[in-house]
């Protein structure tokens, strides 16, 4: 087992299920101490905390004051955070012409500003502790060539997260390395909301299948660990060749 995260503390937002939960389990297997996060103190979040014997924080990532309080609580308990993984996010499919101000704000508050809030809250502590790594979870649909109908607000927010990654990499280097992962279609609890058009589209990668959350987690933790010591400012598209397939 690769223990490149041995002794490091990793905070993963949105880690009660899906890619976040898979990343938390793998991080523990690689020797990390994990701090779990969810929007609310849900049964799923408590269950993950019990399973991994990990501390849990709960807050709305869109609420800067709540994020600051949660981070302070986290640091009081674990002392330091070496790796921040900004995974929290959601998509609410809706036609562009039906998107009002509230829908745009919600998409950006959670998928973009949530990451901003955690970075701003943690970077001073990371610097005081000697540095760290940040991995943002963007999305395949945040890259213009693969944007699909009905998720435009989500796609634009994730595109902003890709740009934020590069901008932060320049500003925070060399003490803190910032990278991102853009997962392709991944089988999680959210796929119950896929219609047949989306399911068919998801199978059009060169590998002819969707990813598992564990496959995405492997790449996320590569960027979080010592094996990526010379990788900075990059967004790795992990889509099974979907982009190359021309869709």
Image (tube, helix red, strand yellow):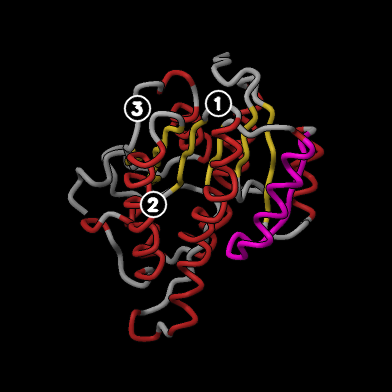
Residue placed most toward the observer, 183 or 108:
108
State the residue at coordinates (55%, 26%): 130
Q: Is residue 57 magenta?
A: yes
Distance from Cα at disc 3 to Cα at disc 1? 18 Å
Image location of residue 68, percent across then percent down: 66, 54
- Mark 2, other Cα within 10 Å: few <14 / some 14–19 / many ≥20: many
- Mark 1, other Cα within 10 Å: few <14 / some 14–19 / many ≥20: few
Q: Nearer the viewer, mark 3 or mark 1?
A: 1
Instruction: Give the labeled residue for mark 1.
Output: 130
Q: Nearer the viewer, mark 3 or mark 2?
A: 3
Instruction: Please state the extent of the stretch shown in magenta in the rendering.
Output: 54-77
Determine which of the numbered discs, if any, sits on residue 59 in the image. none
Q: Nearer the viewer, mark 1 or mark 2?
A: 1
Q: Is residue 119 left or right of residue 197?
A: right
- Mark 3, other Cα within 10 Å: few <14 / some 14–19 / many ≥20: some
User: Mark 1 vs mark 2: which is more N-terminal?
Assistant: 1
Instruction: Give the labeled residue for mark 3.
Output: 231
Distance from Cα at disc 1 to Cα at disc 2? 30 Å
Distance from Cα at disc 3 to Cα at disc 2? 19 Å
Instruction: Give the labeled residue for mark 2.
Output: 139
Q: Quadrant of the C terminus?
A: bottom left
User: Mark 3 vs mark 1: which is more N-terminal?
Assistant: 1
Image location of residue 114, percent across then percent down: 54, 58
* Residue 182 in view, yes or no: yes
Q: Is residue 71 left or right of residue 128?
A: right
Q: Is residue 207 magenta?
A: no
The image quarter in which residue 52 lies: top right
User: Mark 3 vs mark 2: which is more N-terminal?
Assistant: 2
State the residue at coordinates (37%, 51%): 164
């Amino acid at each position: 087992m690769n223990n490149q995260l041995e002794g490091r503390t990793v905070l993963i937002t949105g880690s009660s299920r899906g890619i976040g939960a898979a990343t938390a389990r793998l991080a523990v297997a690689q020797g990390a101490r994990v701090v779990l996060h969810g929007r609310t103190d849900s049964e799923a979040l408590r269950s993950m905390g019990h399973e991994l014997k990990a501390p849990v924080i709960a807050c709305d990532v869109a609420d800067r004051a709540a994020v600051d309080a949660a981070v302070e609580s986290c640091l009081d308990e674990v002392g330091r955070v070496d790796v921040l993984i900004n995974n929290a996010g959601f998509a609410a499919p809706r036609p562009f012409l039906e998107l009002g101000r509230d829908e745009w704000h919600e998409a950006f508050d959670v998928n973009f500003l949530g990451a901003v809030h955690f970075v701003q809250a943690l970077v001073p502590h990371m610097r005081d502790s000697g540095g760290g790594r940040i991995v943002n979870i963007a999305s395949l649909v945040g890259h213009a060539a693969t944007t699909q109908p009905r998720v435009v607000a989500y796609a634009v927010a994730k595109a902003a997260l890709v740009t934020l990654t590069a901008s932060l990499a320049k500003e925070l280097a060399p003490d803190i390395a910032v990278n991102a992962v853009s997962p392709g279609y991944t089988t999680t609890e959210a796929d119950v909301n896929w219609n047949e058009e989306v399911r068919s589209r998801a199978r059009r990668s060169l590998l002819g299948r969707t990813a598992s959350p564990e496959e995405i987690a492997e790449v996320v933790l590569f960027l979080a660990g010592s094996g990526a010591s010379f990788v900075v400012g990059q967004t790795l598209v992990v889509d099974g060749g979907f982009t190359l397939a021309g869709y």
